[in-house]
Image (cartoon, grey):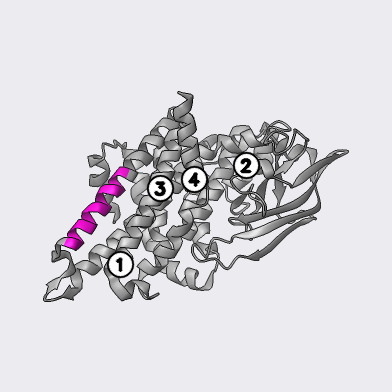
Amino acid sequence: MSSIDIFPRLDRLGLELGAEERQIVASVRDFAQRRVAPGAAERDRTGAFPVEVLRECVELGLHAMKVPAESGGAGADDVTYALVMEAVAEACASTAVVLASSNLTAKVLDAHATAAQRERWLRPYAEGRLGPASFALTEPSCGTDASALRTRATLDGDAWVLDGEKMWITSATHAGLHLVFARTDEAGPRSAEGISAFVVEAGTPGLVVGREEDKMGQRASGTAAVSFDGCRVPAAALVGERGRGYAVALSALGAGRVGIAALSIGLAEAALAEGLAYGTQRRAFGQALTEFQNTQFVLADSRTELDAAWLLTLRAARLLGRGDRASAETSMAKLFASETCARVVDRMVQLHGGYGYSREYAVERIYRDARVTRIYEGTSEAQRIVIAREMLRA
């Protein structure tokens, strides 16, 4: 979908964008198609982290979109953030997820950092002096279940000493700073209480970043394990209150879910565009594939489900923008968008036939990139739990 095509569709979805927001979205869509998309296949093949592309993203402020201008960020609202994430994901999901992780970390720092921490870490990050940022919560023994977190931080004089290991950390190999969650207090078995958040700068002694994972999809996102072996950080590296780190993490989850919902939509839109193009030019039994009723039904179902995903995602973004926690709505958006993405991409691979299984066609890469959207930023199962819990609480 080109930058020209997006606005009529958004208008028909009932989204009213101001002139400034339209300019931002159009500019990012143009940048994504012109600078991000051309190297996506090669980065996927080699697993190379998109260093140069991200440098240009930083110049556009895409790594700190929701950080206010007074702190050096772009000061974008939640709807604009979602539209930007969708646009980048259409071009390259690896680049999009790096931006998603970085924006998640930046949002936490903006919401919970002290004035001194903002000057030491948030402003230099927002100004592009630290590279991407990582959100280090997941561990080998826990993902969605943060109560099983084992990494520890022990206060030793005027420093915290971290020991433990994190897993599946996006951007870990190139991050200038890591937002690390560690257990500081005993609060009973399998409790989310007693967890605290810390900023750990790249290069800190005792911080070891492992090799990049050889993943099925989103291969250029620099995913790696991060371990801490007597890693000392100053007492001032504690973000928020001691023992309230899980609440710090939760405070950003709504925006994180909306970001991944938008990323999922971007992947599905890219796949649908590939399917439409292929179906129009590919002929069978004397006619284009798009002339068969079955193909038309596949396209119709995909477009309908995608528009529904758009509506759920935009609703969640609007609610967040109003200051609503929107737990159920953000989970609905992430759940439905990621599962719609899976269905749409699978249909487009099927439409391509054997060619959909070949790396010469973009839909093969999109298929691999799409699978993880139902896992990270909270699995589909976890989203259903959140939605049901909010229903039963009413």
Q: Residues within 10 Å of mark 3 (few under 14, many from 20)?
A: many
Q: Is residue 124 visible?
A: yes
Amino acid type, residue under disc 1 in the picture:
Gln
Residue 290 as seen in the image, left or right of residue 88 = left
Q: Which residue is mark 4?
A: 381
Give the SS element for disc 3: helix
Q: Which residue is mark 2?
A: 122
Q: Is residue 296 shown in magenta? A: yes
Amino acid type, residue under disc 4 in the picture:
Glu
Task: Using the numbered discs, state the Cα–Cα distance from disc 3 to disc 1 in whole angstroms.
Answer: 23 Å
Amino acid type, residue under disc 2 in the picture:
Leu
Identify whether 235 is placed above or below 34: above
Q: Which residue is mark 3?
A: 262
Q: In front: mark 2 or mark 3?
A: 3
Give the SS element for disc 1: helix
- Residue 39, position as x, y percentages in the image: 44, 68
